[in-house]
Image (spheres, rainbow, N blue to C red):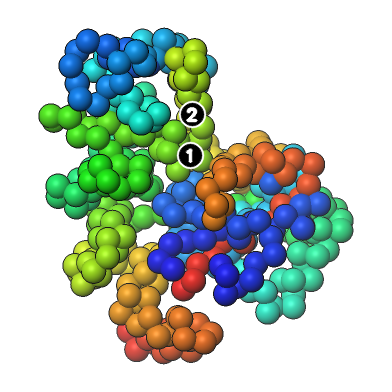
Amino acid sequence: MEKAQAEYTVLVDKYDYLGGQFDFNYIPLTILFDEEGRMVQGARPANIHNENQVSALEEWIKNGENSFLAASASESGAGTSAMRSSGFASPEARKLFWQGVALLDEDGRDEEALPVLKKALELDPDNWLIRKQIWVVEHPEKFYEGDIDTAWQREVMRSKK
Amino acid sequence: MKYLTLFLATALAAVLLSGCGNGSQFESPGMSITSFTFNGEPVPLTSTDYRYENDTVYLATTVLNQRMHLELQELVPGRQIGICTDELCIPYALDPSEENAAIKDGEQFFIPIIHLMESLGSTAVWNKESGTLEVDYRLHDSDSFTASLNNGLKSAPVSFSLPDIDGNVISLDDFRGKKVAVFCWASW
C-alpha cells in the first residue's frame, strides 16, 4: 500500500470477506454503491488505464442514476459480470485454499503451502484468487520487481491451452 | 503482500461470563456475561459457553455453530483452526502468544468474538461494566443477495465493515449520502 501511495481510504480484507459476499474470484475489480448504500454495479473488472472505463465512472459520479453506467447496469442486472462466478467451486476447494493461506501465514512454510494450493486449483481451475496466489509464491519476481508482468501471465495461460 | 487489499475511493463518494468458581484457568474471577443478545434476541449462556481473559471475551465454537452456523475446521494440525462460513475461513492460531489466538480448553475451542465479528464484517460490542455482550451478525444469504443484485437500482442497501491498515474498523455505512466506488486489488 505504501508503494501504491494510495490517497483514499484503504481497507484490508485479509480473509477475502468481500470475495465471499460479492461472489468474485478475481481482482482487480470495482463495485459501485449509490448514496443510499445500494449496489449500482456489482463486481466488474477494473482497468484504470482503460479510458472508456474511467469516462463511464466519471459520468456516473456526475449524473448518478441518470448515467449510462447506471442505466446499463439496471438493464443487465446490477450484479452481472462476464467473469462473475460463485466464490469457490466446492467446499473442498475452499478448505484447501484456506489451509494453504494458513500455511503461507506462517513464516517458512511456503513450500508446504504450494501443493495444498495446487490441489485447490485442480478442484477450482477457474479461481483466479487461488491461481494468482500460487503464482506470487512461485514467481515473486513477476509481481514485485517493477510492474506486474501481465504479459508473462498471458503467456502462461496460453501455454496451458 | 500475500493478502487481498480493498481500496475504497472516498473522494468519489460523493462508504459474561459467569465463570466464577468453576476453576477454569481461562476465567477472570468476577467477570461474567450478564446479558447476551444475538441480532437483538436474548440468548442464555452457560458457564461453559464462554471465557474471559485479558479483557477479551471468547465464545465457544459450539455457540458459533448453533447461532451463526459457523463451522470449525482444523487448518494446520495442532497450530491453527479456522472458523468458516460457506465462502471463507477466519484462521486462529492456537499458540497463546499469538495475537487474537483461540483458546483450547480440553476438547472445546473458544474464539475472540469481537475479532471474529469484525473479520466477518459484523459487530460485537462488549460492555465490561454492565457485562453485556451484543452480537450483530450479518451474513448475506447468497440466493436472496443475488436476487437483490439483479433487481438493479432498487436493491436493498448493502453494508460491510473492514479494518484499515491501522486496525480502525470502517463501514460502508460511514459513507451514506455519498457515491462510493470500491476498488478491490492486491499486490499481485
Q: Describe residue B173's horizontal placement relative to residue B80 as left or right.
A: right
Task: Name the residue tied to disc 1.
Answer: B118
Taking the spot 52% from the left edge, 48% from the top edge, the residue there is B167
Q: Are marks 1 and 2 on the same chain?
A: yes
Mark 2 belongs to which amino acid? Ala
Q: Badge 2, how many Cα within 10 Å: few under 14, some, many 20+?
A: some
Q: Is residue A74 visible?
A: no
Q: Are marks 1 and 2 in contact (CB under 8 Å)?
A: yes
In the rendered image, residue A97, in percent from the top left (x then y), is placed at 30, 58
Q: What is the total number of numbered labels drawn onto the structure image? A: 2
- Mark 2 = which residue? B124
Instruction: Name the residue at 19% across, 34% down.
Output: B104
In-image side of B175 versus B147 (left or right): right
| Kind of residue sitting beneath label 1 | Glu
Label 2's element?
strand
Q: Chain of mark 1?
A: B
